[in-house]
Amino acid sequence: MPYPNLLHPVPISIQALDRSTTVMDPDLREPIQNEARAATASCPGQVAWGSDQKLNARPDGLKEDSDGYVLFRLADLAARSITLKRDDRFTRLGTINADVYVTKLQYMGHYAWSAGPTLVKAFFKDLQPGRQTKGA
């Protein structure tokens, strides 16, 4: 069966967070200073900017906001041996240089013939304080 098509796909540069070589805080389970990243990989994706609401307090916790999302076909990611995770970084969105981080993944496009999802929506956010140098 054919996979769903993306509308106007552009190349997305992805750097995965390498948790095995990153020094982590044992109490907070978050990277200390500079995190280690894998080599940059590229995959076509459909970018949408400004697609999420602002911070929203809910009874079950805070819903994080995002600057937009990139829609990927899981078949394209699998063909390039890419597994998206939270905190992965997008360094290029088509022709735009970026420094944005994956905040949430949402699987979609569930068809009977695929026995699961065919698409993943990777919400991203610019975490600017993380990009600043020490003392700046």
Image (cartoon, helix red, strand yellow):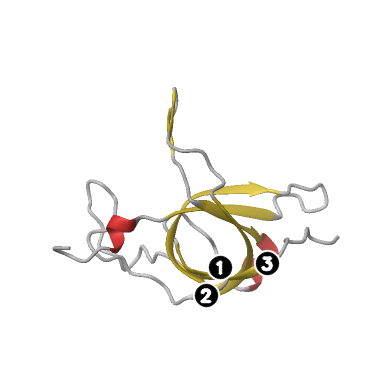
Q: Quarter of the image for the C terminus: give it.
A: bottom left
Q: Are marks 1 and 3 in contact (CB under 8 Å)?
A: no
Q: Is residue 33 above or below residue 40?
A: above
Tell me the tag on residue 82: 1
Find residue 88 and report its image quarter: bottom left
Q: Residue at x 29, y 53 (%)?
A: 30
Q: Which residue is mark 3?
A: 9
In depth, the one of 25 and 41 nearer the eye is 41
Instruction: Measure the C-alpha gap from mark 2 to mark 1.
Output: 8 Å
43 displayed left or right of 34: right
Front tag of 2 and 1: 2
Tell me residue 44's x, y (percent).
Answer: 64, 69
Quickly name the residue at label 2: 41
Q: Dot 3, crowdedness within 10 Å: few (<14), some or many (≥20)?
A: some
Q: Residue at x 46, y 38 (%)?
A: 54
| Kind of residue indicated by mark 1 | Ile
Q: Nearer the viewer, mark 1 or mark 3?
A: 3
Residue 96 percent coordinates (x, y): 51, 70
Quadrant location of residue 126?
bottom left
For the residues labelled 2 and 1, say whether their Cβ atoms are less than 8 Å apart.
Answer: yes
- Alpha carbon separation for disc pair 1 and 3: 17 Å
Q: Quadrant of the N terminus?
A: bottom right
